Image (cartoon, helix red, strand yellow):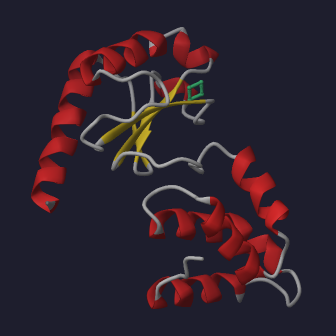
Amino acid sequence: MPTFSEKTLQRANEIVSHYPAGKQKSALLPILHLAQREWGGYLSTESMDYVAQFLDISPVEVYEVATFYSMYNLQPVGRYVLEVCHTGPCCTVGAENIMGYISQKLGIKAGETTADGLFTLKPMECLGACGYGPVLQILEKFHEHLTEQKIDDLIAECRTKAAALN
Ligand code: FES
């Protein structure tokens, strides 16, 4: 079973300390975010079991939360997850075309990851930015009023950043 790094463990304990004794389960969402960040952007069964042990709750309590919220990835993902809103209001302003354009540009379908491990295309329900559609999120940052040109620029920017990190 994986374990948190020292730094993450400190942060996790600090988060838990915000809740009354015995109510540590309330820290589940932020702890799952930490776990996802710690272990490559997704939650394996082993990492969810570790979180359950850490919070002293049953594994199924973790699974039911992790499988409910779309911000948790349950499979390995690319370095950049393109989370594209495909709910009604965004669709009326072109979200489906944007999804199709990304899919064609990267050669992947929704839910897939590029062979180089850089990009995952993930359709999302409403991201809460309906007035700014089409919208996508990458690494917790929103990109609004998307056009094909903006997608080209975003993908190029991600590739440049990834190259600089390697
Ligand atoms: S419908 Fe796309 S952000 Fe709400």
| Residue at the (81%, 74%) spot, across then down | 25
Position of the C terminus, as image quadrant, is: bottom left
Residue 61: image location, x then y, percent: 84, 63
Q: Is residue 56 left or right of residue 114?
A: right
Dividing the picture into quarters, in which one does residue 130 lie? top right
Q: Nearer the viewer, residue 59 or 65?
A: 59
In terms of image quadrants, where is residue 87?
top right
The residue positioned 33% from the left and 38% from the top of the image is: 119
Relative height, residue 121 to residue 104 (above, below): below
38 lies above or below 11: above
Q: Is residue 67 above or below residue 87?
A: below
Image-quadrant location for residue 115: top left
Residue lying at the far front of the rendered structure: 1
Residue occupying image coordinates x 43% and y 31%: 112
The structure residue drawn at horizontal position 84% and vertical position 87%, both measured from the top left corner, is 20
In percent of width and height, residue 7 lies at 45, 88
Query: Which corner quadrant holds the N terminus?
Result: bottom right
Q: Residue 126: x, y in percent?
A: 62, 30
Q: Is residue 21 above or below residue 79?
A: below
Horizontally, is 160 left or right of 138 in the view?
A: left
Picture mark count: 0
Q: Nearer the viewer, residue 52 or 152?
A: 52
Tell me the quadrant of ligand 1: top right
* 8 or 147: nearer the viewer: 8
Residue 145, x across and y down, in percent: 38, 23
